[in-house]
Amino acid sequence: MKGILNLLARARLVELSDDERPDPRAESQAGDAPGPFAVPPVQPERLPASADRQLAAAATQQASLPETGEDLVGQAFTEIYAAAGVPPSPYPAEKLLRLLDGLRAMDAATRRTAILAMDEADDNWQIGDCLRDADLKIAALAEHKRLLAGQLGNREAQSAELVEQIGRTLEAASEAIRQQIAELQQLLEREVTRAAQERSRVEAGLRAAREAAERETRRVDAEIERLREIPNTFSAAGAAN
């Protein structure tokens, strides 16, 4: 299992922990004296160049898009009116709205009559000033809405392009990873076959060594028996004399 993890780590498909990482000194010693199971280094590219470019482009575009819509909202009405060039009014529409709010207890006709009477009694302002100011501000707000719709449309187009780009990047990355897995599977199969061959060779050598040892044991036993004839013969004769 540790060998497979190291293999996958070389292919940049897994990240090893500190305990799982091999000892560099051991790797150096192993490199000085390669054994029959030495695995050639596997260093496929993590992603093809086209996928890298797509990923970089997607990341750049994503960084340019705000993560929320806060950039589209919250502009003060005064800023919108100033940007549209609405001039100051002697009697702003907002002031008249506050006056209307204060007269909500009256019906609409009575409120209108009361405000027109105030207009006649005060030479500092005219109802026409409020009407012009309200029309200009309504037009400015309508233009702001149009610009907002355009900004949203651009955001939607950019987001759709980014989503498509992310999909292409994922497809390219998936294909590259599948290719790496196929290459690693082939490498694993070769190593399994090589290991089986080496195991068979070692086991065959062991069998041959056992058979040779048995033959040598029989040969030595036979010579011992042949040599024992001398002590058996003459030791028995000496004891008789």
Image (cartoon, rainbow, N blue to C red):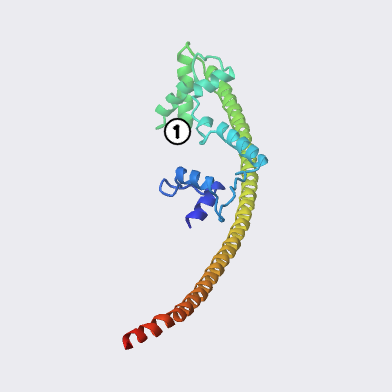
| 154 to the left or right of 32 | right
Q: Position of residue 142 (x, y in %)?
A: 59, 29
Residue at 46% from the left image edge and 43% from the top image edge: 24
In this picture, is 129 found above or below 29? above
The residue furthest front is 241
- Element assignment for label 1: loop
Q: Where is residue 103 in the image (x, y as percent from the top left)?
A: 41, 28
Q: What residue type is labelled 1?
A: Asp
Out of 101 and 192, give the one closest to the viewer: 192
In this picture, is 82 found above or below 55? above
- Residue count near mark 1 (Cα–Cα under 10 Å), binned few <14, some 14–19, many ≥20: few
| 198 to the left or right of 234 | right
Out of 188 and 29, give the one closest to the viewer: 29
Q: Can residue 28 be seen in this view?
A: yes
Residue behind mark 1 = 107
The residue furthest top is 123
Residue at 59% from the left image edge and 20% from the top image edge: 84
Q: Position of residue 34 (x, y in %)?
A: 55, 50
The residue furthest right is 50
In this picture, is 88 found above or below 22? above
Out of 111 and 219, give the one closest to the viewer: 219
Q: Where is residue 95 in the image (x, y as percent from the top left)?
A: 45, 21
Residue at 49% from the left image edge and 45% from the top image edge: 29
- What is the quadrant of residue 158 in the picture? top right
Q: Can residue 152 be seen in this view?
A: no
| 89 to the left or right of 101 | right
Residue at 42% from the left image edge and 81% from the top image edge: 230
